[in-house]
Image (spheres, grey):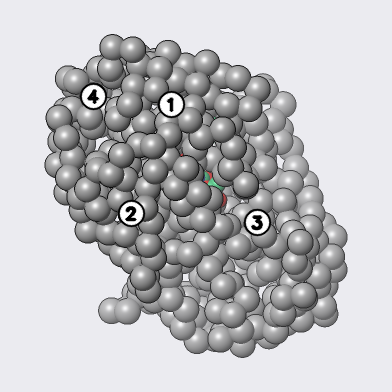
Amino acid sequence: MGKFIIKGGKPLTGEIELMGAKNAATKMMLASLLTDKPCHLDNFPSIGDTEITAELCREIGSNLEVKGKTLKIQTPEVKSNKVLQLSRRNRIPILALGPLLARTGEAEVPILGGDRIGPRPVELHIKGLTAMGAEIEIGETNYRARAPHGLHGADITLDFPSVGATENIILAAVLASGQTVIRNAALEPELMGIVKMLQKMGAIIELGAHRDIHVEGVARLRGVRHKILPDRNEAVSYACLAIATGGKVLVKDAIQDHLITFLNTVRRLKAEYEVVREGIIFSRNGNKLQPLMIETAPHPGFMTDWQQPLSLLLMQAEGESLIHETIYEDRFGYLKDLRNLGADVEIGTECPPGRECRFLGKEREHVAKIKGGKPLYGGKLAVRDLRAGIVAVIAALTAGGESEIEGIDEIDRGYENIDERLRKLGADIVRA
Ligand code: EPU
């Protein structure tokens, strides 16, 4: 297990280019399983999560070749619809159920691993696929699915606009017989990227006006060349890094459309951004940051993966800020860890007045009060998940003194060569 040694306190400046979005790339690899023809994914990120997905696809029978930043993936035939084990775990395998059921009528994949963020249930995936004719057994280590009469369209209402469940149902529906409607669907830009790719492959997918997605099953899909959208979560990480260290960074390829809610937050904080042709420039411009109340929500709301890097800015704002996390049941472990570097935070279970969410009365630690204005100091942190990991890195780069960050494999799952890229911005970070 590697670690980073970081000496903080320097403003970081320069340019950093975004990779292709992790949360689109992995699902696009699975979408390629729906055809026997070659698929080319441009702007392909070489990160831990795409390596795990590549292993899954290889087990199934895909041929993969990465040249520069392009992945060529082709699955002429499904050699195995049972993947019993992978060398590492992430949350992707369950999304292979749809393509495997569509191509062979049977599938077995390992139970999810991935980020250690609360319980993260999958009943919406299971309910959706079951409504489409799949019979699913959940074993100790694996999901086993069969669709003895093939998959058929269904009218499915999600209790919560789950990204994974929406993707799973779309991947299953494009080759199913008849029409599938997903109500209360997720609409994240990464998911729209997958929709665009499937559309180019020959799928018929309509977006309704009320979080409803309509998929008309087709007999077959063809190969495709598709460019993976830039990673907006990376963009937010680097934006917060620039502002937190008092530097100025051009985040190349950042797309304003994907960041509208975040950019409004930057303005409310009294930090600065400028949208330019190459991307978006972020800085603090010598301003004092303002405390804020933030509530995470499904897209187009404030994304849950942004609250961790933003918390570091709230720690620098004079006064008390509040984060109300409404997506994950338990995503504040990282804040407790940041107490080791001097963060003054209180974690609670009660929704803010008038802002009741689905965790009301469930004793979930989903509200954080941050008392800002106290500088962080160097210390030791162990990374608990990907986004917590990047926060640990930014916190250490902001703090006075030296820090040691352990368990950095989690960070490598989603950020390509992060240390090398941060050194180009002037960061003092080494991998030990
Ligand atoms: N949920 C259920 N039942 C389900 C599915 C979800 O109750 O069957 C609830 C749970 O509360 C769960 C929450 O919905 O904790 C969010 O789950 P969702 O299915 O929306 O998320 P996901 O598909 O598991 C993706 C990203 C996450 C990102 C979320 C929210 C991938 C691989 N992961 O997860 O990204 O936070 O959407 O936008 O696409 C990350 O990149 O670090 C990361 C965690």
Q: Assess disc 3: are there few (<14), some (14-19) or many (≥20) residues with their C-alpha within 10 Å of its C-alpha.
A: many
Question: In this rendering, would 265 be left or right of 293?
Answer: left
- For image coordinates 62% across by 76% down, the residue present is 419
> Is there a contact, CB below 8 Å, between mark 4 and mark 1?
no
Q: Amino acid at mark 3?
A: Glu
Which of the two discs, 4 and 2, labels the residue nearer the N terminus? 2
The amino acid type, in three-letter code, at marker 1 is Ala
Kindly report the distance in space between the C-alpha atoms of the residues bearing marks 3 and 2. 25 Å
Q: CA distance from mark 2 to mark 1?
A: 20 Å
Eye-nearest disc, 3 or 1: 1
To which residue does mark 3 refer?
410
Residue hosting label 4: 176
Distance between the alpha carbons at the discs numbered 3 and 4: 36 Å
Identify the residue position indicated by label 1 in the image: 107
- Tag 4 or tag 3, which sits nearer the N-term? 4
Q: Which of 262 and 290 lies nearest the eye of the viewer?
A: 262
The residue at which mark 2 appears reads as 73
At which x and y percent is residue 338? Answer: 77, 58
Disc number placed over residue 208 in the picture, else none: none
> The residue under label 2 is which amino acid type?
Ile
Q: Nearer the viewer, residue 79 or 157?
A: 79
Q: Is residue 89 above or below residue 3?
A: above
Q: CA distance from mark 4 to mark 1?
A: 15 Å
Q: Position of residue 381 (x, y in %)?
A: 80, 61
Residue 330 position (above or below residue 144)? below
Amino acid type at circle 4 is Ala
Residue positioned 48% across, 55% down in the render = 50
Nearer to us: label 4 or label 1 = 1
